[in-house]
Structure formats: structure tokens, C-alpha cells
Image: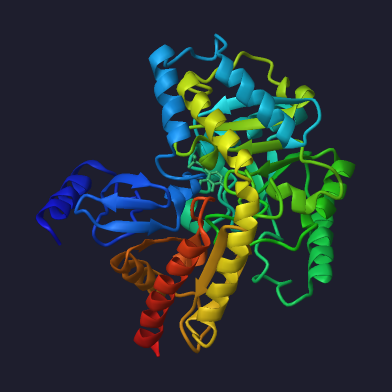
Amino acid sequence: MTHDSASLYVRHQAVLPSWLGLFYERPLELTHGEGRHVWDAEGNRYLDFFGGILTTMTAHALPEVTRAVAEQAGRIIHTSTQYLSRPMVELAERIAALSGIPDARVFFTTSGTEANDAALLLATAYRGSNQVLAMRNSYHGRSFSAIGVTGNTSWSPTSLSPLQTLYVHGGVRGRGPFAELDDGAYTAACVADLEDMLQQTAGGVAALIAEPVQGVGGFTAPPDGLYAAFREVLTRHGILWISDEVQTGWGRTGDHFWGWQAHAGNGPPDLLTFAKGIGNGMSIGGVVARAEVMNALPANSISTFGGSPVTMAAGLANLTYLLEHDLPGNARRVGGLLIERLRAVSAGLDVVREVRGRGLMIGIELVRPGTGEPSPEAAALVLETARERGLLVGKGGLGGATLRIAPPMSLTVAEAEEGADLLADALRTAQQRWA
Ligand code: PLP
């Protein structure tokens, strides 16, 4: 450990809360980035396979975004939502049109947590009930209500919540009582379970909140169409569907612009929440809903920093770049190659249980060889080894045993191959440790 990172660690311990999760044994202090790479304070260069935390959607230091931020900051930095700014209205128009929700309205926040908070507030106000359905193993943010609908035990430290939450089967394909069923039977079993729950539960449920692909939960997805099948049941009961697209939005999953589109059989969700990548690291979150749901609140509501012009200008420039350079298509093509390559290098390594995902949202679940039990130790070792080799990845899933790969969506084929080779090396190190 160098003197600098040691003193940074001491300072971090002195001022930050103990529950703040840092990935690495030695803290990593980043100084700058470019494209798909970042540099640390010691001058080391890393290929960024986690894109911040899926926040660097297009590329680090993208000139188009940097320029838009500087120009807007030179004009006016803040207007608050009591005034309009052109970038806010333009970004709202573009997101409303892209959302697929008819008669859509957009409310901007500064994070994914607040976006989900707002969506839950709107849905419960609209329905006059504080009962909510959420998925097992889900993650929706760290406010009181977002924690209240988070199923993932590592991230939901309290059972107290302003909402009454009922957890539904279906979000995690490989676990639970229906895990062994084929896709069709799995979906039918989850739908039957949902129907049964609704019949046997007192009170009217306001909404279901669900991530189309669970992010923090380890990049695990249900069979396509599951939420469309749920939707039919929900509509019969008057229950709203909130699709949490904080990780899955903007084409990251390759095949679709939104995660809900893999479940589109019975129409779009009633509410959609977004954040992470749209600002390329600037703080933008938001909720999209039909006007009648968006206007359900009987009182004034404002977000002082939500929709701030500098962030909106960044979002507009970033979205324009994403679409003009067809980065969703790139996520599909390069993500497809990357997952194949990762599957190939993992074949024969029994420390790897599964390589899964879609587009540039790829999970590698690690287990203790011979037991099949999730291995957070193996994941931590791979993370550290990859860092030494110059590659940053994320982790999550049950007990933190899944490596999460979500690079900026401009990833090139050469970078995908380089990252896969570095990761292969780190996976072999973990395999040798436990063989
Ligand atoms: N929803 C999902 C699916 C997320 O993955 C996250 C963050 O990881 C959030 C909500 C919360 O977003 P934020 O950290 O911006 O508050």
C-alpha cells in the first residue's frame, strides 16, 4: 500500500459511515477517465468494465457532454423547477416520446432512489393504498420507502417501512421453488402464485415495482414475457405496474431500449423510472407516467435540484450521442461477443456457476467448487486480481458472489476481448485457489 492510499483509507474511516460499501481492500482513488478507461491517483490505467456504476453510459470524458455542461454552466447553472429551462423541456419531450407510455409526463429527480420514491408516492396516491408488490432479491434505492420495497437482504437493513410490501416470485430465474421448471411452466407458476397472493391478501394493492433485469441482485432476469403475464393479472385488479429501468434503460440490454419491452405483450408499464446512465455521471433521475397518474398528487411537490439545467444539457447531449452512434446496437453486438467469449473462458472452471445476461449487462456467478454454494470470497479474489491486471468490474447478487460487467456502451470489440482475457486470468486464479 502506498503512503497516499493508506492515508486516504484512514481519512475515509474517520469521516464516512461504516456501512458505505467500498469494493476493494485498498481504496481506489480515481482522478480522470477517457473513453472506456480510468486512471487512479498512482497513475495506473484501468479498463472500466463497470462504467462507474452503469453511470458512464456512453464514454468517460465524452467531448460532446463536457462541452454541453460547460456551455450551459456559462449561461445559467440552476433555475429550480419553479422556472422552465429549455434543456429540461427538451429532455422531457424526448424521454416521454421514447418511453412508450401514452400521454406521458416526466418528473425529474436527482437519483434513482428519488425516482422510485416519486413513483411509489404517485402510485399509492392514485390508488389510495400503501400496499405494494415487489420482487424477491430486488433493489430499488436507499431512501426509507425504496429500502421498504427492496427484497435483497444485504441492501435492506430494516423491515420497518412506510409501505406494506409483499414479495413476489419471479425475478430470480435460478432460485426458489420454481427454479427447475422450464420457462413456460416457471412463468405459469409465478403467475398462479401472484393470483393466489392477491386472493388471500386483505386490502387493495397499489402497484407492483420490478426491475426487468435485477441489477444489484446479480444481473438475473426472468423469462421474457413474465411481466406481460403479470400485467394481465395486475390490470384485472387495478394494480399499477412500475418498471424500474434505472439499470436496464437506454438500450443497455441490447435487444430493447427499455427492459419492459421484453415483456410488452400487454402494453407498456404505467410508470417507468430511470437514472444512472442518462446523465453520463451527472445526477439525473426521473419518473414517467400517464398524465392521470402523474397528476394524482393533491399537494404541491418540487425537487430543488431535479431537472437542473446543467444536468439536463448533459442528458440531452448524451442521449443524442447514444442514438446517433447506435450504442444500443453496439451493446447488442459487442455484448453478444463478450458473453460468448466469457462463456468460453469459463468452460471447465467449476468456480463459475453461470455466465448470464443480455447486451452489456453480464453477470458471472461464482460458487465454491463442489458445493454449488455462492462464493463471495471467490468474487472478491477475482475483483482484486482483475484490479491488479488493470480491469475494474462490479459485484452483487446473493452474498455478493456475482461479478457484474456493464462497461460504457461504446465498448469496442478489441476492448471486449482484452477485458475478457484479463478476467479469464483472474477467474483461473480463483479456480486454482479453491481447486
Ligand atoms: N433502482 C435500481 C434498479 C438500482 O440499481 C439503483 C441503484 O443501484 C437504484 C434504483 C437507486 O439509484 P440511486 O443510487 O441513483 O439512488
Please state, as top left, top right, bottom left or bottom right, where the N terminus lies in the image.
bottom left
Say if 204 sits above or below 373 in the image. Answer: above
Say if 342 sits above or below 258 in the image. Answer: below
**Residue 57 percent coordinates (x, y):** 51, 45
**Residue 194 percent coordinates (x, y):** 79, 55
Left or right of 359 on screen, residue 345: left
**Residue 316 percent coordinates (x, y):** 56, 29
Left or right of 47 on screen, residue 262: right
Frontmost residue, 132 versus 395: 395
Residue at screen point 52% across, 50% down: 410
Q: Residue furthest left?
A: 3
Residue at screen point 38% across, 75% down: 426
Q: How many marks?
A: 0
**Residue 64 percent coordinates (x, y):** 47, 33
Left or right of 260 on screen, residue 151: left
Quadrant of residue 148 in the image?
Answer: top right
Residue at screen point 50% across, 80% down: 345
Left or right of 218 on screen, residue 388: left
Residue at screen point 49% across, 78% down: 367
Q: Residue furthest top?
A: 83
Please state, as top left, top right, bottom left or bottom right, where the C terminus lies in the image.
bottom left
**Residue 318 visible, this angle:** yes
What is the image's colouring? rainbow
Frontmost residue, 202 versus 68: 68
Quadrant of residue 354 in the image?
Answer: bottom right
Say if 128 sits above or below 84 in the image. Answer: below
**Residue 122 visible, this angle:** no
Quadrant of residue 290 in the image?
Answer: top right
